[in-house]
Image: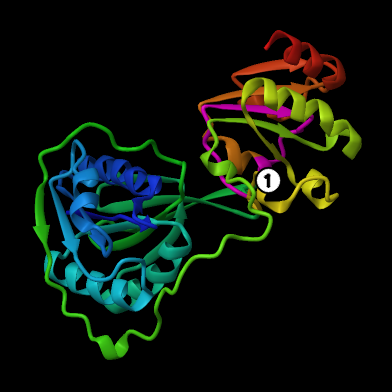
Amino acid sequence: MILAVAEHRRDELRDVSLEVLFAGRELADALGTDLHATVVGGDVDAFADELNREGVDAVHTVDHGEEFNHDVSVQALEQLVDDLTPEVVLTPHTVNGLDSAPALASRVDYPLVTDAVALAVEDDTLAVDREMYGSKVETTLELPAERALVTVRPSEWPQAEGVGDAEIQPFDATIDESAVRSTVTGFEEVAGGDVDISEADVLVSVGRGIGEEENLDIIHTLAEALDATVSASRPVVDNGWLPKNRQVGQSGKVVTPDVYIAIGISGAVQHVAGMKGAETIIAINNDPSAPIFDIADYGIVGDLFDVVPALTEQF
């Protein structure tokens, strides 16, 4: 059995939960086994309905608390793993996932691999691909396919779709309240969080090719014409021309918009790591050998100061 751990925040199931289901279904098929999902806390009945996707055989709910809590989650998942004895546990590679996964792995004695970008099975071996050194190197770690805990990088897999016929099974975990040492008292947005670029459908992203802060006006004008959100590569943010919450990349945010327009962005691996999951990538750069063209669906080789105003006029 493969056990996929779902994640929620502020009464909403996070998209990465459905991506973990997709990865779990692929892995379950490769191993010839079932896929089970679990969710701890919140509106577990509503979350179970959302997790009941095609290919999911059962959903286990733990009705305890409203938001993620390390101590509650680890206790509940430890008991569930002991009860189900899954071969592989998959959990999102997120703040919450990285909070609970190491403790859970230690308690259930499962080898832990984090930040997986691909999974494969050969005989009795689970091969987990992960990136290192700023995504410059991809490594493959091998571990027993019958006992592993893996955190899955968001945006590397599609979301599971379709309505399934999973059996919803409430799980009565025994939570030792004396061991719960923290509580969630509320949420506070990060400073400068005027927008969440990870939720945008269309992103107009600008890089060092813009030259000067004053030149950003043509980027904002294009974004307005497209009803899009402006984002940036790291050099623009480091120069203080746009706030940190607008940064796309390994040290910024991972985004998966329908359309990503990269303007004056060379395509360094650190930036590509944050936007390669976009459905359609359009690149504008005056260097025909810029790496961004290697992943772009459409490319325009030209001076952005000529191309962007022309695009704005057309839109």
The foreground one among 169 and 276 is 169
In this picture, residue 33 sits left or right of residue 78: left
Residue 34 is covered by the magenta coloring: no
- Stretch in magenta: 253-271
177 shown above or below 129: below
In this picture, residue 211 sits left or right of residue 73: right
In this picture, residue 132 sits left or right of residue 192: left
Percent x, y of residue 176: 23, 86
Percent x, y of residue 148: 30, 62
Q: Can the viewer see residue 109 in this picture? A: no
Quadrant occupied by the N terminus: bottom left
Judged from the image, the secondary structure of the residue bearing numbered disc 1 is: helix
Which amino acid type is shown beneath numbered disc 1?
A: Arg
Q: Where is mark 1, residue-wise?
A: 246
Residue displayed at 61% across by 45% down: 195
The foreground one among 59 and 215 is 215
Q: How is the image coloured?
A: rainbow
The residue at the far top in this view is 314
Residue displayed at 12% across by 66% down: 171
Percent x, y of residue 291: 71, 30
Quadrant occupied by the C terminus: top right
Residue displayed at 65% across by 25% down: 294
Asked which quadrant contains residue 273, the reply is top right
